[in-house]
Every structure is written in structure tokens, then in C-alpha cells.
Image: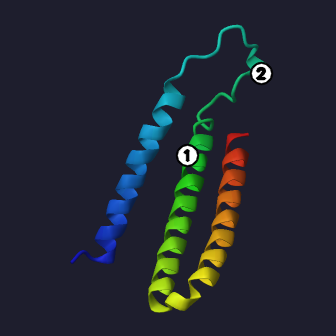
Amino acid sequence: MMSIVEKTLRVTIAMFFVFGICAAPALASEPMAGVAPQDAAPAGHWAPLKYIGAGLATIGGGYGIGRLAAAAMEGTARQPEATGDIRTSMIIAAALIEGFTFFAIIVCLL
């Protein structure tokens, strides 16, 4: 049985690995030819943070929807007669989580 510290460490290492894979193509791309410097992406060492923020927003949204689905499945297993109500509540909550995630991604990338 793993302790909470081991689980947290493994999740943290996995997140850094995923961020590195997701950000590598964006950081390795060539600058566009014919684009004036004021129209280009922001320069400096702060520019990659927007990709990390977008990744965090995506992971947070996925985690939230996963927790929501797990709770809905558990509720359905405990009370099969309430399946319709649970499903409706789950879909509304999932739509709110996805909307927030899309908004956060757009804010990060702008």
C-alpha cells in the first residue's frame, strides 16, 4: 500500500513529464518568417508559462470531470432509481467544468 506522500510524489513527477512533452513542440518551433517583431509572440523567459498554464487548466478540468463521473457512478450504484437525476446533475456540472477549462485555456494562451 502506497502512502499519500508516495502517491503525491508520483503524480507530481508524472505532471512535470507531461508538461515537458506538451511544451516541447511549442518551445522548439522556428520563428515565423516575415512577421514583424511587435506581432510575434512575447519574447523572454516568461513566454513558456502560458503553455504550462494551459496544461494545468486542462489537467485540472480532466481531474474535476473524472471525480464528478466517479461520484456519479457511485451514487447510481447506491440508488439505481435516481439514475436520471444523477445523470442530469452530472451533465450540468461537467458542462460548467468544461466551460471554465476552455475559458482558462483561452486566457492562458492570450
- The residue labelled by disc 1 is 52
Q: Which mark is residue 39?
A: 2
Q: Is residue 100 above or below residue 29?
A: below
- Which residue is depicted at the point 46% across and 32% down? 24
Residue 101: image location, x then y, percent: 65, 56
Residue 109 lies in quadrant: top right
Q: Secondary structure at mark 1?
A: helix
Give the left or right position of residue 24, taking residue 2 as reference. right
- Which residue is depicted at the point 66% across and 48% down? 105
Instruction: Pick whichever, 25 or 101, lies toward us.
Output: 101
Residue 3: image location, x then y, percent: 27, 77
**What amino acid is labelled 1 in the image?**
Ile
**Disc 1 to disc 2, C-alpha distance:** 22 Å
Q: Are marks 1 and 2 in contact (CB under 8 Å)?
A: no
Outermost residue toward the top? 34
**What amino acid is labelled 2 in the image?**
Asp
Q: Residues within 10 Å of mark 2 (few under 14, many from 20)?
A: few
- Which residue is depicted at the point 69% across and 71% down? 92
Q: Which mark is residue 62?
A: none
Residue 57: image location, x then y, percent: 60, 55
- Which residue is depicted at the point 64% across and 83% down? 85
Sequence-wise first label, 1 or 2:
2
Give the left or right position of residue 11, taking residue 57 as reference. left
Q: Is residue 38 above or below residue 71?
A: above
Instruction: Pick whichever, 37 or 74, lies toward us.
Output: 74
